[in-house]
């Protein structure tokens, strides 16, 4: 009698496992990505004869994980379970900055390590402060905040520092479109940072007309700026 009861229960468990497995969501992997646009008018006709060491960026602990972060309140972070970054956020963003710098031809050499090539003249480092989806029932935004610092190596002097806190509305309420808009924000910030560093390096190089005209963004720290569509 007991065996007759066990067999149907086992069969039911197997069916639940089989059909239940079919409903498990598949992990989806995302990356920030963009092709840098054409460089803005440069102060100098050729790359500055400097070497910049690009240090891997740091990140706030709340964002230092593979799961994509979203929030519906300033006081609570949530994490997608099945929507994750394909690459560590610190590596992903540092790689994008490296590609953008190489494309810009701002300086003669970009290295990632001190033993990679020429001795660096400057070090570019930074902190990723936010990389998230911000949503409500009606409005979704991509949000990116980061700070960049350019330091002269021979004396440790920071010659450039700027914080970007940017958001962009997402009209299609899907995380993939949030990541697309994050990529737009990333390109926007790094394009401006390269313009800023062109001015600073122009001053270091001794150019007479290096100034801060032509900002894409107001040069104000700790300000959320909504990037136009």
Image (spheres, rainbow, N blue to C red):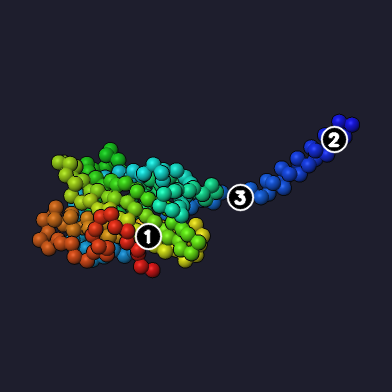
Kindly state the secondary structure of the residue where label 2 is placed: helix
> Residue at the location (30% across, 40% down)?
113
Frontmost residue, 192 versus 222: 222
**What x and y, as percent, mark residue 55?**
30, 43
Question: Which sits in the foreground, 81 or 136?
Answer: 136
The residue that disc 1 covers is: 167
Which residue in the protein does label 2 denote? 5
| Residue 88 horizontal side relative to residue 192, left or right | right
Q: Secondary structure at mark 3?
A: loop
Q: Classify mark 1: helix, strand or loop.
A: strand
Q: Quadrant location of the N terminus?
A: top right
Q: CA distance from mark 1 to mark 3?
A: 29 Å
The quadrant holding residue 180 is bottom left
Q: Nearer the viewer, residue 127 or 115?
A: 127
Earlier residue among tags 1 and 3: 3
Q: Residues within 10 Å of mark 1 (few under 14, many from 20)?
A: many
134 relative to 129 in the view: left or right: right
């Amino acid at each position: 009698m007991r065996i007759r009861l066990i067999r149907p229960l086992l069969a039911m468990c197997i069916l639940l496992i089989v059909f239940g497995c079919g409903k498990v969501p598949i992990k989806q992997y995302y990356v920030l990505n963009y092709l840098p646009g054409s460089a803005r008018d440069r102060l100098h006709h050729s790359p500055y004869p400097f070497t910049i060491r690009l240090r891997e960026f740091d990140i706030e602990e709340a964002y230092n994980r593979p799961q994509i972060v979203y929030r519906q309140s300033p006081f609570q972070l949530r994490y997608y379970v099945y929507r994750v970054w394909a690459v560590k956020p610190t590596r992903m963003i540092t790689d994008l900055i490296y590609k953008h710098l190489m494309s810009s031809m701002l300086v003669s050499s970009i290295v990632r390590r001190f033993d990679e090539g020429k001795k660096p003249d400057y070090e570019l480092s930074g902190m990723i402060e936010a990389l998230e989806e911000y949503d409500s029932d009606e409005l979704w935004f991509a949000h990116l905040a980061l700070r960049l610092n350019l330091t002269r190596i021979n004396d440790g002097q920071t010659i450039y520092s700027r914080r970007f806190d940017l958001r962009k509305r997402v009209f299609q309420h899907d995380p993939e479109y949030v990541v697309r808009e994050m990529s737009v924000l990333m390109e926007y910030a790094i394009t401006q940072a390269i313009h800023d560093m062109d001015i600073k390096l122009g001053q270091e190089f001794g150019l007479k007309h290096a100034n801060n005209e032509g900002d894409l963004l107001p040069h104000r720290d700790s300000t959320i700026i909504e990037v136009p569509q």
